[in-house]
Amino acid sequence: MSFEVVEEHTNNLLGRREAKLVVHHEGAGTPDRLTVRKLASEHFKTPVDRVFVRSIATRTGGSSATCMVEIYQDEKSADIVPAYLKNRMLPKDQRVAKKKTEEEKPAAPAAKAPKPAAEKKAEAKPAEKKEEAKPAPAKEGKPAPSKEAKPPAGKEEKPAAGKETKPAAKAEPKPKA
């Protein structure tokens, strides 16, 4: 695996060098961040702790990856690197995963979500029967959509559901008869 430095410039304000590398990896997959980090630290002769890989991009089917690397002058200036980037530089078994705590919280609401979806489907069927049973009265149909536009507010959903069940009962005997 070989690489070349395409661009390099010094950012004195942030105390770092920013480099664009092209890593050639013929016959192998895209190199991981740890490998690129080691290559860059050896080339720039700095400790691995001060080298951070911003991005690695490989074109589909290509054998070279374009990498953006930041090399900090000292550890104090490296403190501005975001925590998520520092986490990416660690081996996979040492990374801190926030996904587990976030997935546990939505898991409970996700169980509740299918129930309202089933209720909406149940409400949609009587609404379809209602439209089939009463296509002629256009005046009554126009106020109904305005009421349907209001149900997104939490208070008005309950009365709307009660009103839909009554016309649905009336609509059922007409198709049967």
Image: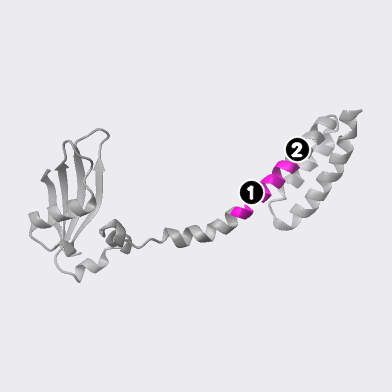
> Where is residue 63 drawn, in percent x and y?
19, 36
> Where is residue 45 drawn, in percent x and y?
7, 59
User: Which quadrant holds residue 126?
Assistant: top right
Whether residue 57 is in magenta: the answer is no
Eyeballing the image, is 140 above or below 55? above
**What secondary structure is found at the residue carrying circle 1?**
helix
- What kind of secondary structure does the magenta stretch mostly adopt? helix
Q: Residue furthest front?
A: 93
Residues 12 and 56: in front is 56
Q: CA distance from mark 1 to mark 2?
A: 17 Å
Locate the C terminus by quadrant.
Answer: top right
**What secondary structure is found at the residue carrying circle 2?**
helix
**Left or right placement of residue 77 versus residue 136 in this view:** left
Identified at 70% across, 41% down, the residue is 121
* Amino acid, disc 1: Pro
User: Which quadrant holds residue 6?
Assistant: top left
Identified at 24% across, 47% down, the residue is 56
Region of the chain picked out in magenta, as a range: 111-123
Locate the N terminus by quadrant.
Answer: top left
Residue at the spot of label 1: 114
Label 1: few (<14), some or many (≥20) within 10 Å?
Answer: few
Check contact, mark 1 vs mark 2: CB within 8 A: no
Whether residue 116 is in magenta: the answer is yes
Identified at 25% across, 43% down, the residue is 57
**Left or right placement of residue 41 versus residue 163 in this view:** left
Eyeballing the image, is 160 above or below 71? above
* Amino acid, disc 2: Lys
User: Which quadrant holds residue 29?
Assistant: top left
Residue at the spot of label 2: 125
Q: Let me know if residue 9 appears in the view.
A: no
Eyeballing the image, is 109 above or below 176? below
